[in-house]
Amino acid sequence: MEISFTKTSLMAAQSSLELSRKGYELLDKKRNVLIMTMMSFIEKAGEIQKRVAVVFSDAYEALQTANITMGISNTEQIAQSIPEASGYEVLNRSVMGVEIPEIKHEEEQLIHYYSFYHTNTALDVAMQKFHEVKRLLYELSEVEDSVYKLAMEVKKTQKRTNALQNIQIPKYEETVSKILEVLEEREREDFFRLKVVKKKGEKRSAKFKDSANHQGGITP
């Protein structure tokens, strides 16, 4: 980069340096907030995953009992009669400029899509557990997607922060230092020249006075 060693260039470089430092501070704060938010989501995801694992285990155990007591074909027919999940809406909310999902779902009551005459309690338990799993999966998908989006933003912010800290700020610091060094050297040279000119002027003035005094002392 070509540097113009003028006071105008110095002011511009100092302004860019100050702006880069402020940008670094803001990005560093943003990164810290994002990391803290992401860590809280990760902790929450871990808790939900544990609950999902327990409920899934109970649900499959009950389903296995239903398959044994009722027959796999009968259980499959009942499963096919259950409609796809509905009654939920995916919204977005902003965290430090990052759009993360928020799933709104209705707390719907469990509806049994089968006759109690040809089924048993094992199927009822399995239905209840899988219904609970569905609710937990809403929460888990919301949290895990939030973690992913926050992690991507942290990565992006980290790159920008590193670029400012390791490239931009040192570059402007070096530019400011070079311009200051050249301007200070010019000021020293100008000062030295002024002193030389002043001394020459004083010598000329002294010679002129001596000459005037000498001429004034001569009688005609």
Image (tube, rainbow, N blue to C red):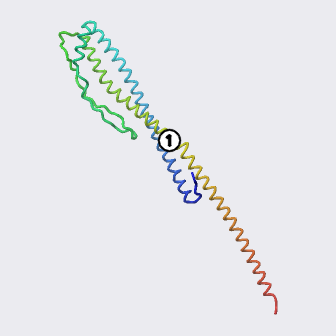
- Give the residue furthest to the right: 219
Relative placement, left or right, of 73 versus 100 is left
Residue 88, how many percent across, how many down? 26, 29
- Give the residue furthest to the bottom: 220
Residue visible at 23% across and 17% down? Answer: 80
Reply above or below: 134 against 201: above
Residue 160, how many percent across, how many down? 49, 41
Amino acid at pointer 1: Thr
Q: What crowding class fits label 1: few (fewer than 14 Cα within 10 Å), some (14-19), or many (20 or more)?
A: many
**Image quadrant of residue 85?**
top left
Residue visible at 29% across and 18% down? Answer: 130
Relative placement, left or right, of 189 versus 156 is right
Reply above or below: 66 against 143: above
Q: Is mark 1 on a helix, strand or loop?
A: helix
Residue visible at 24% across and 10% down? Answer: 73
Q: How many callouts does the rendering have?
A: 1
Image quarter (top left, top right, bottom left or bottom right) of the C terminus: bottom right
Judging depth in this view, the residue of 11 and 214 nearest the camera is 11
**Image quadrant of residue 105?**
top left
Which residue position is annotated with label 1?
161
- Give the residue furthest to the front: 2
Residue 131, how many percent across, how many down? 27, 20
Residue 76, how many percent across, how many down? 25, 13
Relative placement, left or right, of 50 versus 64 is right
